[in-house]
Image (cartoon, helix red, strand yellow):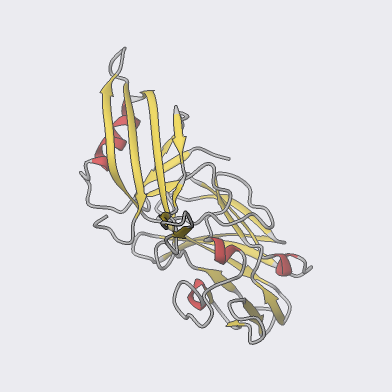
Amino acid sequence: MGNLWIGPPGAMTEIDQAAKSYDRSADLGVTEFKSLGGRVTVTRNQSPVRRLKLSWDLLAPAHARVLDRIARRVDGPGPVYVVDPAAGNVLSPAQAAGLGTPGATDLTGLAQWFRTTTGTVAESTTAPGTFTFTAADNSSVVAWRCTGTGGNFPVSPGLSVSFQAPTAIAALATESVGIDFKKADGTYLGTTSAAGSLVSGTVPAGAAYATPTAKPGTAGTYSLAGACFTYGGTAADGVPGDGLPPMSVTGYSDTPGRPLPYRSMSLDLVEVSGAAG
């Protein structure tokens, strides 16, 4: 895997120094209720909240300044995105498995994917919550939305990205894949594409977002399970999704190091639903 990147779309900074400590445990929101008879009842959040706790010793001045600006919201309220080097797939867990909330047309269900030319994304009538792509002809293309942004996947120039087509599409001899790059305003910038099931490339200058695409090249209906979109490494079939949620800093420390100008820093971040954090 690659290094940690952090910041807003198009302006994420690569932190190439390994963190001294790195805790990525999700907050499950579990509460226990114990009855007088000793029985325990457990309640928990339906969707666990991602939390990150990072700390560095003697961080280089340039990187320390970036983290300090993010923590103090000097450049705006956010949110920020963290490219987690421990995450092998930035698609959401359900999205990577070709699943979603039964009957939902938003980003928990049908809207996780869209067609770019011909074809149809639909929920299975026999297996609710399972989604497929029907290619109408050899030009049909399906694309993936980032559930954390409601649209494209945030990237920054210089970041390595890689996409692996869903298992059913990867099995075809006619398939091809691509990664579309877009500017901060969403306008199209360029595409990295490849014949076969795997494409890898580097985010070009001026890009703030990316959209992975797959083209079966043969008419038919295909499961969307098994897709993988990876930052900093090479995508592979069937890697579980980790997601790429927007995050906000909830706490940090900044201690001048010896020798100066190095600084020891820590950041606490939490998954948020909006820019206000």
Nearest the viewer among 98 and 66 is: 98
Furthest-front residue in this view: 37
**Residue at image x 43%, y 60%?**
44
Furthest-top residue in this view: 259
- Quadrant where the C terminus sits is bottom left
Q: Is residue 227 left or right of residue 27?
A: right
Nearest the viewer among 28 and 4 is: 28
Where 262 falls versus 55 (above or below)?
above
User: Residue 183 at x, y = what percent?
Assistant: 39, 60
User: Residue 82 at x, y = what percent?
Assistant: 42, 47
**Residue at image x 54%, y 73%?**
100
Where 207 falls versus 266 (above or below)?
below
How many badges with numbers are in the image? 0
Where 156 falls versus 101 (above or below)?
above
Q: Is residue 73 left or right of residue 263?
A: left
Q: Is residue 141 left or right of residue 19?
A: right
User: Residue 263 at x, y = what percent?
Assistant: 31, 23
**Residue at image x 55%, y 61%?**
93
**Residue at image x 61%, y 52%?**
200
Nearest the viewer among 96 and 144 is: 96
- Quadrant where the N terminus sits is top right
User: In which image quadrant can residue 98 be found?
Assistant: bottom right
Q: Is residue 36 left or right of residue 170?
A: left
User: Residue 141 at x, y = what percent?
Assistant: 60, 75
